[in-house]
Each structure stands twice: as structure tokens, then as C-alpha cells.
Image: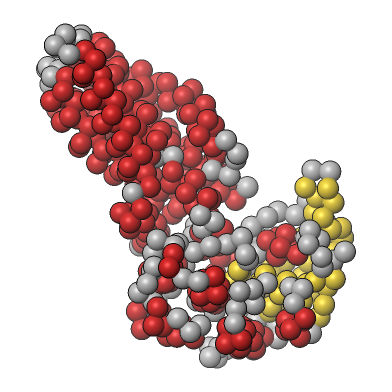
Amino acid sequence: MPWLEGVLAVFLKDWRSEFRTRYALNAALLFAVTTLVVVSFAIGAFGISGDLLAAFLWVVILFSSMAGLGQVFIKEVESRTFTALRLVARPSEVWAGKFFFNLVLLLGLEVIIIPLFFILLNPWVSDWGGFIAVLILGSVGLAGATTLIAAIIAQAKGKGALLAGLSYPILIPLLAAATSGTRHLFRGDGGAGQESQILAAYAVVVITAASLLFDFIWNE
Amino acid sequence: MAPPNQPEVSLSAKALTQRFGPNKIFESLSFEVPKGQGLVVTGPNGSGKTTLLRILSGLLRPTKGDVRLNVDGKVISPEDRLKHIGFITPELALYEELTALENLEFFAHVRRLKRTKADHLALLERVGLKERGRDLVGTFSSGMKQRLKLAFAIQHEPAFLFLDEPGSSLDEDGRAIVKGIISEQKAHGALVVATNDERELAYGEKRLALA
């Protein structure tokens, strides 16, 4: 299918570019590893509650994604390839290609962050399946929203502050559901079924909104 | 070489006005460029040459006025513009972390062109970069980057070619390549060149001087 080929071309181009420059990966990974190590040293032998651990995990994921995922469009503008991309690619292919790039990047980051989190902070999880479901659904929503917001702010001045400022109100429902679901799983006082449904609904809404809005954002 | 059975193409702009906030860039520009002809746009810095080309290519919406790109008697839709427009400007750059060949392969994929590696190498040879096809664009000189941008602009044999300062950074061989591209473009489509270079004024039959 031509549309999928276009999406794949954007996705592969971004990965090839990322492997050669480590533009997003280094920024995100540096934040995640530094934060995890610093906090684990700070709390030392004192354990912290499941409530705090759940919040801390999503703070690390959120700020890592802010440091890395927002770069997908900013990099195109700063390196002046944005115009070339606008001249050749259909908007929906660009959004989908960059969304999948961000999603794979975020899931890849989590493959490093999560084991490190468990090694350093040693939380207990009541349901691993539920925990992985919360992580994956939360990541889909986070990648979708961040990709869309990054496209909106890419051509603005003061991009860093704008990305954070615009993202937080939009991400609050996602963060609330993800943190609540993770907290239940860390405390062992119930599953995260309801939160998983909220996260799935959030992801559907974000992806639908992006598919409706992105042509306008891209062409204006 | 241009393919046989080429479509009839023409470009018309009516009463184009562009403002950025309170600043008027140009006002009520109207012109037509039929197939086989070139329009050369001249004017001092800030007169709106690049802005006009961005409007013609669909990258910028004019404050007022209308641009129509006709192919075989039909006005092409904004979605179809990608297929029919080739545009380079000093504001545009290609991917420096990719090789020249990888850039052309990527653009061919998203343009939905069926091209082989041999086709890409032939295009690179045409702009004098065949031997550097596997080198990262970041290692290229400014003249080599300009040559690659020319390859990017003509890769899909567009009906409308818009060149903003096409000879910038190019040596004499590079300028000869531009001349060849322009002759070929006029054989199958329409051309607009923005320049203040005396040597490039002859690229078009028509001239539009912006104040």
C-alpha cells in the first residue's frame, strides 16, 4: 500500500538519522539514567512507598519523553529539511511515520529504564501483565500526544518551554490514569483494568485528533 | 530526456498580494507562464522573490490572490501539487546525516516513484555527484549540496520547476548543469527562476521585477 510505504519511509529515515546522530536518544537516556541513579542514592536503604514509586516512574518516563520525543519535528526545522519534507510527503504519512518513530523510541527507552528502575528501587508488582499493559498503553498515548504537540510548536520560538507548557494540560489525564494504575499494581490492592481502559481511550482520542488536525498543522 | 506524450501545463497568478503583519511585500502581482517558457523574477533583497516562489509552490498561502497550476486543462489540487512541483531555495536543506543516495532513495519513496539504485546514480551523475553518492551530505561543500538540491528538484520530472538562486555556490560546471536542466524543463513544463545574477537573466523569456 502506497500510504504504508510512505509511513515506513519516514520511519526508517528518522531511525537511520537517529542512529547516526543520537539526537533524541542521548537526551532522553541521559535524563532517565541520571534521575534514577540520583534518586536511588538519595533514598539509600530507606524504601519508599508504592504510591511514590508509581509517581516517580511516570515522572521519569514523562521527562525523558519531553527531552527526546519532541525533537522529531524540531530537528527538521532546525536543520532546514522541513521545507524539503513538506514538498515531498503527505501530511498523514509524516505524522504516522514520526509517531511510530517516537513510540519505538519510547518503548526502547523503557526497555532500559524499567529494569534499571527495578534494580535500583526494587518495587513489588502484583500483576506483571497489567503493569506491561499500563506501560504500553501509556506510551502509545504519550508518543501520540507529544508527536502532535511537537509538530505544533516546531516552528515557534522558545520551543522547549512551549513543548512542556502545551503538553502538560493535554497529558494530565494520561499521567493520572497511568500513575493510578501503576500505584494499584505496586501496592497490590487491585488491578489496573479501569486505568488501562482510560489509557486505551486516551490513545484512540489522541490518534484520531492527530489524523484530523495534522493536515492543518502541517500546511499552516 | 523528457518523456513523450507530455501534458499541457501552464501557471497563472492573479492579483497576488503578500503582507507579513503591517509590512507589504508585494501587491497585485499577475502573470502567466505557459509550457515551454520561463519567468525570471528579479528584485532587491526583501522584495519578495523567495516569498513569491514559496506561494507558487504551495508552501505559503498568499494574503490575497490566487495561483493556478494547470495540467492538461485541469487545475491541480493542493494534494496533487507534490507530484507536479520541483522547488529549491537557499532556505531548503537536505538530510546531512544521510548519504546523497539515501536522500534520493528517501525522496523517491515518499514521492511514490518507482526508481532503482541505477536511476538514482544516473541522476547523481547528471549533477556531477556520482562518485560521491555514498558520502554523507554533511561532508559536502556548499556547491555540492546545491547540485544535490537540483537533483532533488528534478527527480520526479515536475511540470513546474521553481528555482530560487539556482546558481548560488556553483562553479562553471555547476552552472552548465543548471542551464541544461532549464532547457530540459522548458521542453516539457514551465519554469520560474528568482535571481539577481546577470548570467541567469537569460533563463526566462519573461521577466518580473519586484520593487
Q: Left or right: where does residue A54 sit relative to residue B206?
A: left
Indicate how the structure is coloured in the image: secondary structure
Q: Residue B61: give x, y in percent of width and height.
A: 70, 54
- The residue drawn where x is 74% and y is 73% is B195
From the viewer's perspective, is residue A169 above or below residue B29? above
Rendered image quadrant of residue B182: bottom right
- The residue drawn where x is 30% and y is 54% is A19
- The residue drawn where x is 44% and y is 64% is B138
- The residue drawn where x is 40% and y is 78% is B132
From the viewer's perspective, is residue A19 above or below residue A142? below
- Depth order, front residue of A102/B134: B134
Q: Left or right: where does residue A127 sit relative to residue A100?
A: left
- Depth order, front residue of B176/B162: B176
User: Quarter of the image containing the C terminus of chain B?
Assistant: bottom right
Q: Residue B11: give x, y in percent of width and height.
A: 73, 73
Q: Is residue A203 visible?
A: no
Q: Is residue B179 visible?
A: yes
Q: Left or right: where does residue A201 sit relative to residue A160?
A: left
Q: Left or right: where does residue B34 sit relative to residue B105?
A: right
From the viewer's perspective, is residue B197 above or below residue A193? below
Count all numbered tags in the image, as a single digit.
0
From the viewer's perspective, is residue A93 above or below residue A135? below
